[in-house]
Amino acid sequence: MERGAIPIESIPGGFDLQSTLESGQTYRWDRDDGHIYDRTGAYGGTAWYHTVVDDEFIRARQVDAHLEWTATTDAVPLLTRLLRLNDDLDAIVDATPADPLIDEAYETYRGMRIVRDPFFPCLVSFICSAQMRVERIYEMQHTLAREYGREHTVDGRTYHAFPEPADLATVSEAALRDLKLGYRAPYVKASAAMLADGELVPEDLPNDYEAAREALTVLVGVGDKVADCVLLFSLGYLEAVPLDTWIQTAIDEYYPDCDRGSYAETSRAIRERFGPYAGYAQTYVFHHLRHSF
DNA sequence: ATCCAGGATGTAT
DNA sequence: ATACATCATGGA
């Protein structure tokens, strides 16, 4: 195992590991203490988190102004990619128009970053997110990894990667339903098969945001909202604004003029108001609304 | 018991 | 294009 520490001061705009990993963006990091998704605790905690990505095991925590890690390889490049450590948060905040709600969210959770999750686990987690609580989405992804993900043994303990598309494409729908995926089971299986067959290649998606969103909806169980989540939390389209129930409530209360009736038009109105990093603003507001509840 | 949770799909208009 | 019922599961 290798180990290291990234000084927080070297991360432009600061960093907060807990809010980044426990804000409903990614479902691929587990806390060592087994306590998933602590909605009551204050941020700035020093818990260890771990994940398996690209056949590598990574463990990380934030303490004493450092992002500490141990891993089966040099984790700095991986952490930089997964947690978008090169994003200049100050510049992103500066580029976002002043707004009371967004300013408050940025102030409260400053340091939280958009993640860059691997495509397939991100896709599956948000297909599963339909009409589902965040805590249970987490459970479903954990179960999928445990049942069908490749095993990694580290210090005598077993961890699991997330399954590949081909792994879930060949699983029966009934088996997925047994994992409590409900009506999402056939969606996951069908989309996994499409990816395994190369019917959609994430790397070949158009650069244009709206075109990419439209292209993603060919997958089963993927509408505009899930597509936006994948574009934002995996593919780096920082203007993507997932219009979920929480954000819709915020629109009703704070930005009623942005509600244009349809998803596409409301999305455009929100993006015109909040700019090229509207996805960052959305994620801060989403987390702020849920966490302050 | 009834409602709701990071929605999408099939069908009818 | 838009409106509606339907889709599992578990917690409040």
Image (cartoon, coloured by chain):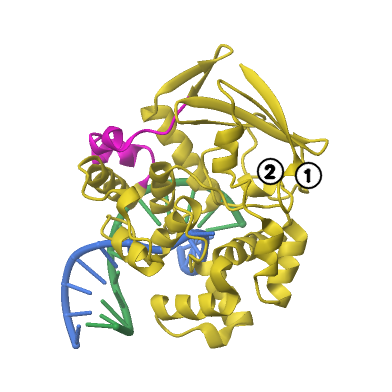
Chain colours: A yellow, B blue, C green
Q: Say if the magenta span includes residue A84.
A: no
Q: Nearer the viewer, residue A19 or A269?
A: A269
Q: Residue A202: where, in percent of width, then height?
A: 33, 49
Residue A261: name its quadrant: bottom left
The answer to whether A174 is drawn above or below residue A114 in the figure is above
| Residue A9, disc | 1
Instruction: Left or right? Give the position of A158 relative to A206.
Output: right
The answer to whether A103 is drawn above or below residue A25 in the figure is below
Query: Please, what secondary structure does the residue beneath circle 1 have?
Result: helix
Can residue A100 be seen from the camera position used here?
A: yes
Tags 2 and 1 in contact by the CB under 8 Å rule?
no
Determine the chain carrying the residue at label 1. Answer: A
Q: Residue A144: where, in percent of width, then height?
A: 40, 35
Instruction: Left or right? Give the position of A123 relative to A68.
Output: left
Q: Residue A132: where, in percent of width, then height?
A: 47, 55
Say which amino acid is labelled 1: Glu
Q: Residues within 10 Å of mark 2 (few under 14, many from 20)?
A: many
Q: How many marks?
A: 2
Q: What is the distance, in whole Å, between disc 2 and disc 1 at their CAs?
A: 14 Å
| Residue A17, disc | 2
Determine the chain carrying the residue at label 2. Answer: A
Quarter of the image where the N terminus of chain A is located = top right
> What residue lies at 57% left-to-right and 35% top-to-bottom?
A77
The residue range painted magenta reads A160-181
Q: Nearer the viewer, residue A247 or C7?
A: A247
> Looking at the picture, do discs 2 and 1 lie on one chain?
yes
Residue A220: name its quadrant: bottom left
Instruction: Kindly report which numbered mark, 2 or 1, lies closer to the viewer in this rendering.
Output: 1
Instruction: Left or right? Give the position of A168 relative to A99.
Output: left
> What residue lies at 29% left-to-right and 32% top-to-bottom?
A167
Q: Residue A13: where, in percent of width, then height?
A: 73, 54
